[in-house]
C-alpha cells in the first residue's frame, strides 16, 4: 500500500496518517479522536470532539504514546514543506549519476545568473533611451534559454514531478491547495518524516500548534 492510496484503494482523507511517526516508539500514527469541552458565553460546558494523529503502537507493544491535534500537525508540516521547496538551496531527494558531483548544475545556475545580469543591463539601457522594446526583444531570446536551463537542472536532479511543480510555481501554496490529499501525501512522504514528541511538562495545557513537539526529519540528497 503506497502513501498515495488509503485502505482498500479509497482516496486518503488525512495528510499525515501513517506518514508521521511516534517520537517514543517509532510506530506510525493513525487518526483518532479526543473529547474536549469549552465554555459557552453563558458559562455552559460545550462538549466536542476533535481529530488527532496518535501513536498506533506495534504488534505486541502498547501504543498511545503521543497524540497531536490533526489540524495543528497538518499546518506545521504544510508550512515547513512549502518553505522547504521555496528555499534556493533545496536539495532534491535523488540525483542522476551523470551529474553526481553537481558540476553541470552549478554551471547551469551560473549561466542563469549571467542571463539575469544581462537582462538587468538591457533594462537600464532601455530605460535611459526610453525604448522599452529593447528589453522586450532581449527577453524573448533570453527567457526561453533560462527556461531550458531550468528544465535541464530538473532532469539532472531527477526531481519528483509533483515536487517539481511546487518548486517551479509562482505560488507554491496555490499549487498545493489544488492537489488532492493523495498527491499532498506523496509530496510530504518524498521529502520528510514528521516525528511527534511527547508534550513537555512546561507546555501542558498550552493551546495552539506547538511546533517544538514536531521534529521534521528531512530526507537527504543521498537516498
Ligand atoms: Zn509510540
Image (spheres, rainbow, N blue to C red):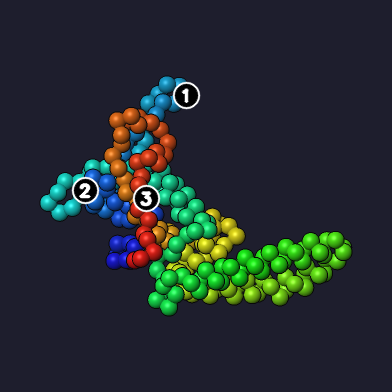
Upstream in sequence: badge 2 or badge 3: 2
Compared with 135, 90 (above or below) is above
Q: Residue furthest right?
A: 129
Residue 107 location (% of width, % of height): 55, 71
SS at circle 2: loop
Residue 85 location (% of width, % of height): 49, 58
Verify CB contact (< 8 Å) between mark 1 and mark 3: no
Residue 149 location (% of width, % of height): 58, 73
- Left or right: residue 27 versus residue 46 is left
- Left or right: residue 173 versus residue 117 is left
The residue at label 2 has a CB less than 8 Å from ligand 1 = yes
Q: Which residue is rendered at x = 21% and y = 48% of the image?
A: 25
Residue 100 location (% of width, % of height): 41, 72
Q: Which residue is rendered at x = 31% and y = 36% of the image?
A: 199
Mark 2 → mark 3, Cα distance in angstroms: 16 Å
Comparing labels 1 and 3, the label whose residue is closer to the camera:
3
Image quadrant in which the N terminus is located: bottom left
SS at circle 3: strand
Residue nearer the viewer, 218 or 24? 218
Q: Which residue is rendered at x = 75% and y = 64% of the image?
A: 121
Upstream in sequence: badge 1 or badge 2: 2
Mark 1 lies on residue: 41
Mark 3 lies on residue: 216
Image quadrant in which the C terminus is located: bottom left
Mark 1 → mark 2, Cα distance in angstroms: 41 Å
SS at circle 1: loop
Q: Residue furthest left?
A: 60
- Left or right: residue 61 versus residue 15 is left
Compared with 123, 25 (above or below) is above
Mark 2 lies on residue: 25
Amino acid at each position: 500500500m503506497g502513501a498515495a492510496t488509503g485502505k482498500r484503494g479509497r482516496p486518503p482523507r488525512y495528510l499525515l496518517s501513517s506518514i508521521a511517526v511516534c517520537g517514543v516508539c517509532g510506530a506510525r500514527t493513525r487518526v483518532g479522536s479526543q473529547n474536549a469541552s469549552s465554555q459557552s458565553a453563558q458559562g455552559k460546558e460545550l462538549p466536542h470532539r476533535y481529530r488527532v494523529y496518535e501513536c498506533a503502537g506495534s504488534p505486541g507493544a502498547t501504543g498511545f504514546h503521543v497524540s497531536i491535534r490533526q489540524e495543528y500537525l497538518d499546518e506545521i508540516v504544510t508550512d515547513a514543506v512549502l518553505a522547504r521547496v521555496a528555499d534556493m538551496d533545496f536539495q532534491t531527494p535523488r540525483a542522476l549519476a551523470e551529474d553526481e558531483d553537481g558540476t553541470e548544475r552549478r554551471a547551469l545556475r551560473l549561466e542563469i545568473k549571467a542571463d539575469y545580469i544581462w537582462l538587468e543591463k538591457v533594462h537600464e539601457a532601455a530605460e535611459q533611451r526610453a525604448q522599452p522594446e529593447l528589453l522586450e526583444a532581449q527577453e524573448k531570446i533570453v527567457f526561453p534559454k533560462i527556461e531550458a536551463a531550468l528544465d535541464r537542472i530538473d532532469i539532472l536532479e531527477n526531481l519528483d514531478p509533483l515536487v517539481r511543480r511546487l518548486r517551479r510555481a509562482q505560488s507554491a501554496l496555490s499549487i498545493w491547495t489544488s492537489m488532492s490529499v493523495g498527491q499532498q501525501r506523496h509530496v510530504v512522504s518524498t521529502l520528510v518524516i514528521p516525528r511527534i514528541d511527547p508534550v513537555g511538562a512546561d507546555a501542558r495545557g498550552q493551546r495552539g500548534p506547538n511546533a517544538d513537539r514536531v521534529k521534521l526529519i528531512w530526507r537527504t540528497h543521498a537516498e
